[in-house]
Amino acid sequence: MSAKLARSSACVCILSLLSGCFSYVLNDRNKLDASSHVPIDEHSPISTVAWSTIWGGSIPVWEPLRCIHEDGSVHRVLDAEKDHSCKVNKPICGSGIGRTEVSLLAYSVPLAIVTLGLAMPAEITLYCSTASEPDTELQGPQ
Amino acid sequence: MPKPLIEIEQNRDWRNWHDTDGVGGVVQQFLTPTNEWADTTAPVPGKSFAAGLEGLCEIVRRAEAANVRLRALGSGWSLNSVGFVDGYLVNTSRLTSWSVGSLSTKSIVPELAGIAKRVVYAQCGTPITTLNSGLEARGLALPTSGASNGQTIAGAISTGTHGSAHRVGSLHDRVLALHIVAEHGKHYIIQPARKPIVTQAYCTWLGAELRQDDALFDAALVSFGSFGIVHAVIFEASPLYLLRLCAKQLDFEDIVRAALSHDISKLGLLQDAGEPYHIEFVINPYLRGKGHKGAFVRVYYEQAHKEGDALPVPALAGATSMRGRDLVGAIAIGSEVLPDVIPSTLQSQLVGIVPSAEDGAFIGTPGQCFSDSLRTGGGTSLELGVPLERLSDALAAVFAVTDKHVFGAPVALRYVRSSQALLAFTHFAPITCTIEFPGIDAPRSREAHKLLEAELTKRAVPHTYHWGQVMPLNSKVVRAGFGDARVDAWLAARRGFLSPAGRKLFSNDMLDALGLSV
């Protein structure tokens, strides 16, 4: 009986850990030709783990920024409320967000089970759009 | 002067888009320059690329000061490490300023004033998809492209990306000038003396030095970042054209003559549909018998587009559409461990990827025909260039390998007009036939790639490799494929343009292995 219980528990654990593979993706479409996706910077995703708690009663709002230093270097401010030191802030993406992914973590469902749904973490990943309109001003000597 | 905004990540582990095994690694600094200034200075209209250009110049100077090697990335689509270096790796994705028909009268040489409205200045990171949609909305189009649209313009050109536009050539064959940031952050306009496009006055306005030199231009065009960082390219767009698709599934014996002669007139395709613009054959090498239907032909016929006419309504992905799909994802990983199922698995994949379209009902813009593709997650591909007149011998070599060693990839044939670029893998005149083997990276595929090289060499078939795909990493293969004269001319042009320190700065391990960094 105890061996059967152990096997069942192990099975539940494995299945709940596998729930960390669940992902959801939102792609924006190309403004001029909706048959293709908006291009994105695949090399520089921006991620955070967001915690929705109290059975969804508390919804985290994530508003990442870029903090710009005088020498031109940048650091990402993933939680603006906790970082007040920055003098010059810019939006996290210069041309907007082109793709958003939300993924459950390996521990999301086990944690939700253990806490009876009190806490449910998920990883949010943003990709900046690289779409651009042509510069219509005249270039070169006039 | 304000500082350009550059995002820097230390010790970043970078992987290519397809997450190919062995490609990429940890880099000392991963730098992302942008077209923004660090303060509140707004971009100047007409020079919206200024911050990005200054950012690249600054990065070169920093790499020199730190004595590390430097390379720029496009979309990271290459299936080898041609764009990778473990020193400073530059992400050009945010450098997307572009313009069309905006060069002033004093910027363009009088001889080419007639094409001024079609002259495009595109910063290195401008995606092909942006150019497709932006140009098409203005009654223009890219003269050609690869099978999909996710590359950046500089990445596509630098690695010799091609379609199957046998009358046009590859994308780099329509480039008129390169704007390159080289040693000490100094930047240059490199254009051919035989057909210059911009004036000295334009270069002065840009702050660039003009190099008008055929040999340098032909060498730098396909050079995968080895002459410096390509900041921008100037190219000529085509008047907008449409493409009518006809695709058919046949037996191998039905298509073999057409494939070898590049003459599709006897395949029973569309009549009076106009000039074939793109001809492509995809073969299941394991189903070549009568009745197997293991060969697919896909032809796009060029159709005129009248100014003012509405563009075709794009088919949305997710619905049933007939867009050119990247073949890299053709084979499931499982087939690698069960080789007996490869022929049938491959066939079912190909039927889905090249659906029959015999009625010619689908008409699209180039951007709609060669649209999005999917990340494969471990994909690989090898692509050869061979002279069209030796295609028969090349296919015999290919089938000698596939008959003994089954591996998960179809054989895709495309046809490209020969290129003047010294290291264009499509240099065989008058037409280079490209033979591609897109599949999943696995030991069987890697072994097959080695066998293919050995068989082609044994049969003395001249062949080159696509710079952005799997290739043998030794100088012998490069010299055998391009000939000593081309390779030596390329090396001489690079030596003339860069000092020894500059050549080291803009090199990487792959270039070393190929004997091209000297």
Image (spheres, grey):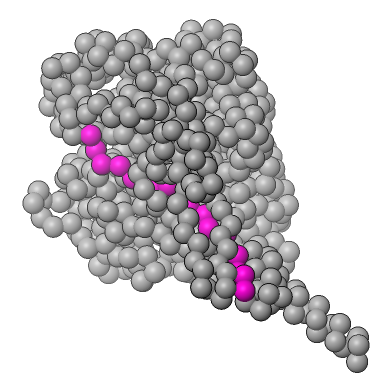
Q: Is residue B170 magenta?
A: no
Q: Quadrant of the N terminus of chain B?
A: top left
Residue B202 placement, left or right of B129: left
Count of marks placed on residues? 0
Q: Nearer the viewer, residue B229 or A95?
A: A95
Q: Is residue B241 visible?
A: yes
Mark yes or no: residue B486 visible.
Answer: no
Between B255 and B19, the residue placed more toward the observer is B19
Residue B43 in percent (x, y) is at 28, 29
Q: Is residue B9 above or below residue B105?
A: below
> Does residue A130 belong to the magenta stretch?
yes
Farthest right residue in view: A2
Query: In percent of the image, x 64 and y 64: which residue is there?
Result: A105
Above/below status of B423 relative to B297: above
- Give the quadrant of residue B462: top right
Q: Position of residue A44 (x, y in %)?
A: 51, 43
**Residue at 41% over, 22% down:** B3
Considering the image in quadrants, where does the C terminus of chain B appear? Answer: top right
Residue B122 horizontal side relative to residue B116, left or right: right
Residue B324 horizontal side relative to residue B364, left or right:
right
For residue B298, what is the image quadrant? bottom left
Q: Nearer the viewer, residue B192 or A82?
A: A82
Q: Position of residue B233 (x, y in %)?
A: 34, 28
Q: Residue furthest bottom?
A: A1
Quadrant hosting residue B28 = top right
Q: Is A32 above or below relative to B231?
A: below
Residue B379 placed where, x, y %? 59, 52
Q: Residue at x 27, y 48 (%)?
A: B133
Q: In the image, which residues are magenta?
A: A118-135
Residue placed furthest toward the left: B308
Q: Residue at x 65, y 68 (%)?
A: A108
